[in-house]
Image (cartoon, coloured by chain):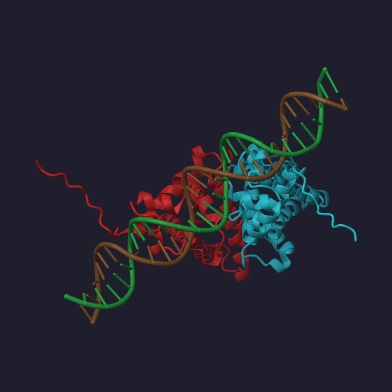
Chain colours: A red, B cyan, C brown, D green
Amino acid sequence: MCAKKTEVKPYHHGNLKEELIDKGLEYIDKYGVESLSMRKLAEASGVSSAAPYAHFKNKDAFLDAVQDHITESLTEALKSAYEKSGEREVLIELGKSYVIFFYENPLYYQFLFARRSIDIDTFPPFQFYSEVAAVTLKNMHSKRLTKETIRKKTITMWATVHGLARFALMDGVIDTDNLDKEIEQLLCSIEV
Amino acid sequence: MCAKKTEVKPYHHGNLKEELIDKGLEYIDKYGVESLSMRKLAEASGVSSAAPYAHFKNKDAFLDAVQDHITESLTEALKSAYEKSGEREVLIELGKSYVIFFYENPLYYQFLFARRSIDIDTFPPFQFYSEVAAVTLKNMHSKRLTKETIRKKTITMWATVHGLARFALMDGVIDTDNLDKEIEQLLCSIEV
DNA sequence: CACGCAATCTAATCACTGTCAAGATTGTGC
DNA sequence: GCACAATCTTGACAGTGATTAGATTGCGTG
């Protein structure tokens, strides 16, 4: 009979870096970052425990890479929300999509903001939000706002959205059956 | 000459539980929770590496205890701010003291909110804030607010304060030379 | 006061972790 | 076709949380 093809594992994985990141994202989404280990990811990728270190200097550098991926997804979610909304309600829509992003992936929030260095001014989601906010605020107030005022208002709105996102993950704080409308109401109670 | 008193270490520490928590607070404040280990704390307390487990079921339970201590300090800071302020600006003052508390202990913020289970409704600082907010809002709007509206406004304000606290820890986001006035301005831009 | 129990501690050990060094394998450009 | 660099394995090390068995001791009860 036909000899069983015994799937010879090649010495080189070929796509280890990406697979590790994917598996990392998946693991964090399911179980959180606390119990994540490089060895488990290596084994799950069918590779020895030291192999990952050919691609990442250390665990921290690996988590940085994972963080970058999540950040990118978040930015895309915001941009997608931007495309879909008219100018009047765009800031509300951006806020909603921010909250919903983390409501759908609660452990991402934990992971992302539990890590040390996030420099807000180079944090792409905030950069994008800032740009949109600047334009919108100027139009709403017929261009009579100073740069400083705009920055203050933007930071405050962002802080609110960020805080609401945290609460959306918690039981009973926000009505999650109707998250969309709920967030809208909450954000509307802020004067901009 | 007088024989050196060779400080015989007693078999029982006598105050281990408290010392561990104190050392834990100190360590987290200095270096953050990531590199904290039960063994290091045990050694620093002059005790074997298994001794802590007579007082705490596991590391997580220990961190819970540390968390409780920080939460208590935060609540006291809020209460103290409440005592010192008149009714008109009390919500602003509570917000300021919340932000300043974490500005002075940035790693506490990381630690506190990176951990999983914080149930907002049994989180003492929020409980206190809620009570104060309920009274204040009713007075401001001459008692014409529903319970639901009050809860929504309270959550939004708290979310903003919480978000601002996070930004206050970051370089360059908020003018930290004049944190007090800065926070006041930011919070005042919210309509309540 | 003495006895015994329960609280607290030590020593030894386990499985697991991040990380490194030395060497094996292999793709790739000259 | 050959050398080099990238990638991977094996084996090791120190540090970690946690458990077990047994040592020490404070304290309440008789």
Quadrant (top left, top right, bottom left, bottom right) of the N terminus of chain A: top left
In the picture shown, does residue B187 fall above or below C7? Answer: below
- The answer, for residue B44, to whether it is visible in the render is yes
Q: In the picture provided, is B1 more to the left or to the right than A68? A: right
The count of marks equals 0
Spot the residue most to the right: B1
Spot the residue most to the left: A1
Residue at 55 percent across and 55 percent down: it is: A113
Q: Residue A75 versus residue A33: which sits nearer the camera?
A: A33
Residue at 83 percent across and 52 percent down: it is: B84
In the picture shown, does residue C18 fall above or below B68? Answer: below
Residue at 51 percent across and 39 percent down: it is: A176
Q: Residue D28 versus residue A187: which sits nearer the camera?
A: D28
Q: Residue A88 versus residue A153: which sits nearer the camera?
A: A153
Quadrant (top left, top right, bottom left, bottom right) of the C terminus of chain A: bottom right
Q: Position of residue B65 (x, y in %)?
A: 68, 43
Q: Position of residue C10 (x, y in %)?
A: 67, 45
Q: Position of residue A174 (x, y in %)?
A: 56, 41
Q: In the picture provided, is A88 more to the left or to the right than A54? A: right
- The answer, for residue A190, to whether it is visible in the render is no
Q: Position of residue A92 (x, y in %)?
A: 52, 53
Spot the residue most to the front: B1
Q: Quadrant of residue A51?
A: bottom left
